[in-house]
Amino acid sequence: MPNYLPNSGPLSFSMIGNGLCSFTPFSLNAMSNVAGFTSPFSVSAFYGLGVPCAILKPFYITNETISSNNACYVERIATRPAWHDGAQPLPVVGDKVYINGAVLLPATIGGWYGMTLAYYSSVQRWIVIKSANPGVVFAQGSC
């Protein structure tokens, strides 16, 4: 991945946080954890870091559910910001999905998520993320 943060000079929490798809208030501990660093944490560790958000596309997802029906009609309002590395506006099979700069891992109940391009909107499509391939879209469909 190319370097997006500078190799030297000023480096602010907002530069780091925006690059890691983090949301304010920015925290050195939280951003370091997202980047995979171990303590003690320092801003200088971020110099030259390849930043995923510079190349990712934003969209919104629902909470995880157990089926496409639940993703589309029970949760149905997407409020969680997410990003993906695909070419389409919404992720498709094989794309990798990120939350706060880290790969979206499936939770324990099934890995189904509703998704849309607009915050607090009714979902248009659903995706499945499976534990065998964390963060990678396994299946997709329309609501």
Image (cartoon, rainbow, N blue to C red):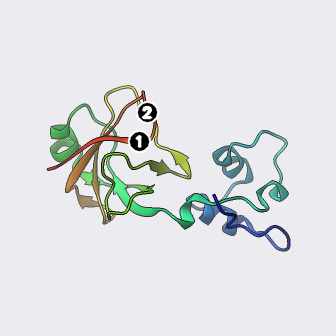
Callout 1 secondary element: loop
Image quarter where the N terminus lies is: bottom right
Q: Callout 1, which amino acid?
A: Val
Residue at the (42%, 27%) spot, across then down: 132
Tags 2 and 1 in contact by the CB under 8 Å rule?
yes
Q: Pointer 1: what residue?
A: 136
* Picture layout, residue 75 above or below residue 108: below
| Res 129 quadrant in image | top left
Residue visible at 28% across and 35% down? Answer: 65
Left or right: 112 as drawn, with respect to 24: left
The image shows residue 97 at horizontal and vertical percentages of 43, 49
Residue 129's place in the image compared with 7, above or below, is above
Residue 133 image label: 2
Estimate the x, y position of residue 43 in percent, counting from the top left: 81, 58
> Could you tell me how far apart the alpha carbons at marks 2 and 1 are, in whole angstroms?
6 Å
> Which percent across, then down, holds residue 47?
79, 61
- SS at mark 2 in the image: loop
